[in-house]
Image (spheres, helix red, strand yellow):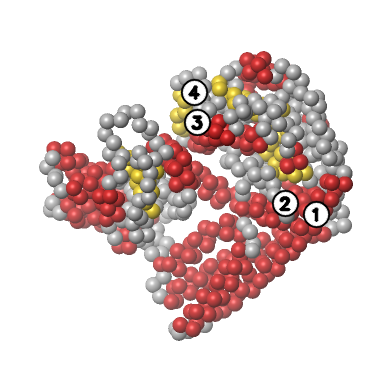
Amino acid sequence: MNIDDTMITSPTSIDGVLEKAVEAAYQAVLAISEGDQASARSRVDQLRFLKALANPREAGQAGAAERVIPTSATVQRMRCAMEALAISEGVIQDWVQQGIRSVASGEVSDADDIWQRLIDHALPASWNFEADLFVVHGDFDPQVQQALASRGQRRMLFVVDEASPATPTPDGEVYRVSNEAQILATLGGLRRPYPDRIARLDLRGDALPDQPDHDALIHKAVMGLWVNFNTTKWFAKTWLEQGIGNIPLVASQHNLSELDGVFQGRPAVLIAPGPSLEKNIDQLRALKGKALLIAPLQTLRRLYLARVQPDFVVVLDPQDQTTETCNFFRDVPDDFLPPLIVAANGHPNVIRKFRQVYFYSSGGPVDHWIEASMGQPLIPLHAPSVALIGLLLARHWQCSPIVLTGQDLALQDGKQYAADANLGPGGKRKLFSLPGYHGGTVQSPSDYYMFHHQFELIARDMAERHPQLALYNCTEGGAYIQGFEHAPLQQVADLHFTRDLARAATGPTRHSDVVVEARQQRTNSARDHLQKTVTAIDASRRQAALCKRMTLNPSQGPKFLKKLATEEHLLRALIKQIEGFSTLYQGDIDRALKASAQATSLKGNLEASRALYAVIDGGCAFIRPLVVQALDRLCAPESGVSPLKPANSAVPELV
């Protein structure tokens, strides 16, 4: 299939795409009726691609398409197009089924024809041959790769017994994998556009019924790409604003590395806010002083009502969780708040609530900026949920055993959180089945479904790298998590929490010479780095303006194009000095680059270039005041004084 024949070269309405799809469907039905297999296949593939353009998010993927409200005339045209497509769909499905019957009966003997008919059957009604993922299970056969490549299929994943390099198709992505680690590494490295759909062709037969089924893992890995993409899309601006704004705080407050070695070998209980927390919340009170109690902010109000004060509260979410609609601090007195462990891009209103704050890196693009500013790394705790952050934290501290409680990873009667802390997202949510703690299955929303997968991956890694660390799931409800021993909390407490913890080492105080000197070094480094960033921002805006002026009065000669390319190369080098910029504006940059690639004339190419320059100029205008404000705070005479409430010790006392 020649994708260029159907590619939309400019922003086109959905009804326009559907009109092209109706024409392709008509041509497909006509070719089928005439018995022209090659033409029918080409037109059906063209129709699949057009349907994919009209419906870019289907098959349960986590990507969310942007919606535009159509006019009544557009709705009418779309309705007529859909009715016409529905009529053709029956003819096409009959053609696909007849092709499979011909293969099964032995009527078709040509090898390529057999593969093509099998592919016809495997492909869904909508398919993007450039982005979507085609999975083949069984021994690698180059004829399958060739058959897929002839259809324009770009991404192919061959799941075989023993992995070896495949011969890539021109401009294509062909992978061979044989185990879960290779699957995760391969799919985790895919670049945009990410697959919206996954098709599979199983060539294994019934000879080996005990072969592992990797389809669920593949589906989760692709979902994970979309989860990360959407998280970045929705929070990139917030991360950037708050991360830059927090640089003075990160420089003047505690680094989480100050606690390294303090809790090694001590039991840790990770308290999650799931509905099953109600079953054992009273037992947690007796564990105070016998285990390190680590809790996400979502548990705070429920724990206060039960008079269970955690040793640390952990926060990942960059949103303001002190507002009336989502206030996890409501009715909780300040003196109940323990030290906070928070991502470096955390919301300042949340951070100000606590007397002691320890910052960590959540892996966001602005985190690298913060670390470069201070000249000191942050402890990396990279995970998509605060519950997983708690697990990584306990692993980093070498706590043992590590115990989960309230970690349902599933809904209970539609509730996400225990008791009155049920402040989770409302509305209808897509649910997935997970194995239940007590057997059977439980229903889990897509985010928890993905987190469950991450819990199992981390548990497997810990079993290999840290076999001395025991893992228990004492949730007593919700989902079963492979890699954890499942037991009642009381039983685990009787085994492992039989003695009081020794009083925690005090460590350096906030005002010791060591801490003051380290804080001053971080502050000085941050000042220098932010000043250089301001210089790079100003230079980028000047360079973007220069490039724009050149495109407004272009010449057709090669000297002009060479000069413009040189200036654009310098512009890209300047932008790279502004960390986090590309992440925040990646969507706008991608659209400008796509328009440039699709331009058919010098004029169109230069218009796309000017759109890119506008993105750079606007982005620099947005970032500059954030950097200047942070720099002003660092340069203020009182910059060494924390805006937080005073605290006396860098390490909490456990008893």
- Which structural element holds mark 3? strand
| Residue 430 visible (yes or no) | yes
Please name whichever residue, 80 or 17, is drawn nearer the observer in this view of the structure. Answer: 17
Mark 3 Cα shell of 10 Å, populated few (<14), some (14-19), many (≥20) = many
The numbered mark at residue 233 is none
Give, as a three-letter code, the residue at label 2.
Gln
Snapshot quadrant of residue 183: top left
- Find numbered disc 1 in the image and state the secondary structure of the residue it sits on: helix
Q: Nearer the viewer, mark 1 or mark 3?
A: 1
Residue corresponding to mark 1 = 521
Q: Is residue 44 left or right of residue 480?
A: left
**Residue at the image point whose x is 84% and y is 50% from the top:** 517
Q: Comparing marks 3 and 2, which lies closer to the viewer?
A: 2
Measure the C-alpha gap from mark 1 to mark 3.
47 Å
In the rendered image, which residue does mark 2 sit on?
A: 376
Q: Quadrant of residue 206?
A: top left
Relative side of 399 to 249, left or right: left
Indicate which disc, 2 or 1, sits on the residue closer to the N terminus: 2
* Residue at image mark 4: 436
The N terminus sits in image quarter? bottom left
Quadrant placement of the C terminus: top right
In the rendering, at what x and y percent does residue 552 appear?
53, 79
Residue kind at label 1, given as amino acid type: Gln
Q: What is the C-alpha distance between the residues marked 1 and 4?
A: 51 Å
Q: Measuring from the top left, give residue 205's x and y in whole percent.
A: 26, 34
* In this picture, residue 516 sits left or right of residue 529: right
